[in-house]
Image: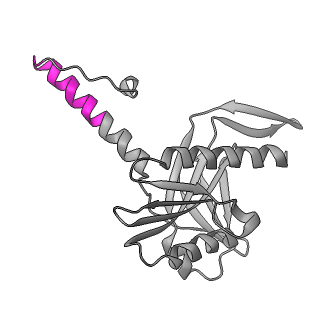
Amino acid sequence: MRNIRRSRGYSYEHALVQRLNTELWNARRLGGSSIGLPDIIAVNNIEAILLSIEAKSGTGDSLYVPSDQINRCLQIRDMFSFYKSRHAILAFKFMRKKRFKRKGGIVYEQRKLVEYYKIADKLDKITDMTMIKCTYQGKTFFIRDSQCIKLNLPNYTMPFQKVIRSEVKNLLRSKSLLKTGRRRTFMSRYSHLT
């Protein structure tokens, strides 16, 4: 089971790096907790932006990030003061299959795949935190002792999400132009979304 989780985590990290690597962005997987670094570092050297990312994926209703992994992200973020915009990001991916136990066995149920990207910059002010919890609905909590306390971590729009949104907006605009009589063809890999 542990190997499955590790493989799922590596796969998500690898996919994030591929999605982040564009003309403006460079991203690398660093090896994560085994060597005391965050999972991913991404930089935009044109706009001077640095992202220190800890990625978690799973089949449950909640995903957890231990405080030592958050602290590593924050330390790397603080090391690079050259960058005007620096963020520690917690990336959560809830898989399409939800895993749960029923009658002593493991059962999987289909659901929508969702991802959340949360800005963890303010967590350096919480000193007695054990871990951060994110639910399938995108709500975040910090766990201290055995208490679960609501924490509203803001969402971060990843560079690849901006591209998708602009393509969808262009598609919607082109469809409205077709309805008004103007002819314009616009095809996108996201055409099925409208």
- Indicate the quadrant where residue 67 lies: bottom right
Q: Is residue 137 visible?
A: no
16 left or right, relative to 107: left
Q: What predominant SS class does the magenta segment belong to?
A: helix
Q: Quadrant of the N terminus?
A: top right
Q: Quadrant of the C terminus?
A: top left
- Indicate the quadrant where residue 44 lies: bottom left
Q: Position of residue 120 (x, y in %)?
A: 52, 68
- In the image, residue 47 sits, relative to residue 179, either above or below, namely below
- Indicate the quadrant where residue 178 lies: top left
78 left or right, relative to 14: left
Q: Is residue 21 visible?
A: yes
Identify the residue at image location x=38%, y=67%.
Answer: 48
Q: Position of residue 89 (x, y in %)?
A: 52, 62
Specify start and end residues of the magenta stretch as a single range: 168-182
Residue 59 lies within the magenta run: no
Identify the residue at image location x=48%, y=55%.
Answer: 26
